[in-house]
Image (cartoon, grey):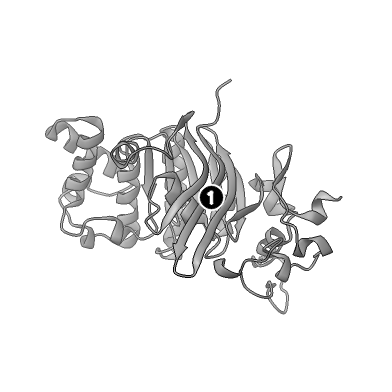
Amino acid sequence: MTGPLLEVRDLVVDFQTRRGKLRALDGVSFSLARGETLGMVGESGAGKSLAGSAIVGLVDPPGRIAGGEIRLDGERIDRLSEAQMRAVRGRRIGIVFQDPLTSLDPLMRVGDQLVETLRAHLGLSPARARERAIAWLAEVGVAAAEQRIDSYPHEFSGGMRQRVVIALALCAEPELVIADEPTTALDVSVQAQIVDLLKTLSRRHGAAVLLITHDMGVIAEAADRVAVMYAGRIVEIGPVRDIVQAPRHPYARGLMAAIPSLHARPDRLAQMPGAMPRLSALPAGCAFAPRCPDVLGRCATERPGLELSGERGIACWRESSR
């Protein structure tokens, strides 16, 4: 039996500010198997993108990894030097960011950017790298790839630019792809195409995917498992079907209830009262307690840990007492 491709254990990320230390990620743990897609969902500020940035060593000062371990195929990567991490990024871990226009160099032709990536990570000759670049553009659905390879990013639509970014992330055939809100900047009609493309290509090339998004529709369509984050912690994790159909944590239930249904026509959409607490004002106990409809007395003073039972994990005092 082989172990997980990616293993994150008790990850802690702090930010040092003039007002003191802020804990943005607090004991985040999860694993990702080869060929698996793990969705990470939660509202803005939950820590999803920060978790992805920590994995690839892109937490900028004053932020820092203050605790925990990140292992890729058994090798610890959270202590690598910047030079060593650059060798990991792109070659072993591909990254798809949410805004394709800012992910691409506007002064370079898209083909030159693909060729540069292929040569840097695979050591190909310029001619061979150009051939591979054309093949990748065709594989991600860019029509007339032989001609479009010499176009600049601004000459592509948003959806086509994101296809180019996906080609850049996958062209070195990494073991893991981190997709951070890959459909947010795109038209709704294009989002499903991009999600399907990412899912198809990752499986075709055997890459695991960490899919970070706030869109449960994207998670339900593309992920095998889902981790629900709130205020820097994972509050529920498990198979996507189980969590979409029968969420157990009150926050996960609130997220699912807020999704409009094609069958039911309520007078009002469901919503959760309140807002996520600021990092400088986190409650002593469960961070969701001030908004929770099922709060217990101990929720205000004791933080629940993520308790695993089979394929499911949940951090909730009421659920753990059942």
**Left or right: 33, with 315 as reference point:** left
Number of residue marks = 1
Residue 316 image position (x, y, % from top left): 75, 54
Q: Residue at x 68, y 71 (%)?
A: 272
Report whether residue 140 is seen.
Answer: no
Residue 173 image position (x, y, % from top left): 35, 34
The amino acid type found where label 1 is placed reads Val
Residue situated furthest bottom in the rendering: 267
Q: Please tell me in which quadrant of the rendered image residue 190 appears.
A: bottom left
Q: Residue at x 42, y 51 (%)?
A: 53
SS of the residue at dot 1?
A: strand
What quarter of the picture does the N terminus occupy? top right
Mark 1 closeness class: few <14, some 14–19, many ≥20 residues within 10 Å: many
Q: Residue at x 71, y 73 (%)?
A: 265
Residue situated furthest right in the rendering: 322
Residue that label 1 marks: 12
Q: Is residue 321 above or below residue 175?
A: below
Taking depth in this image into account, of 320 and 171 the one nearest to the observer is: 320
Residue 92 image position (x, y, % from top left): 37, 35
Q: Please tell me in which quadrant of the rendered image residue 116 appears.
A: top left
Taking depth in this image into account, of 57 and 17 the one nearest to the observer is: 17
Q: Residue at x 55, y 44 (%)?
A: 38
Report whether residue 92 is seen.
Answer: yes
Q: Is residue 73 above or below residue 221?
A: above
Residue situated furthest top in the rendering: 1
Residue 43 image position (x, y, % from top left): 56, 64
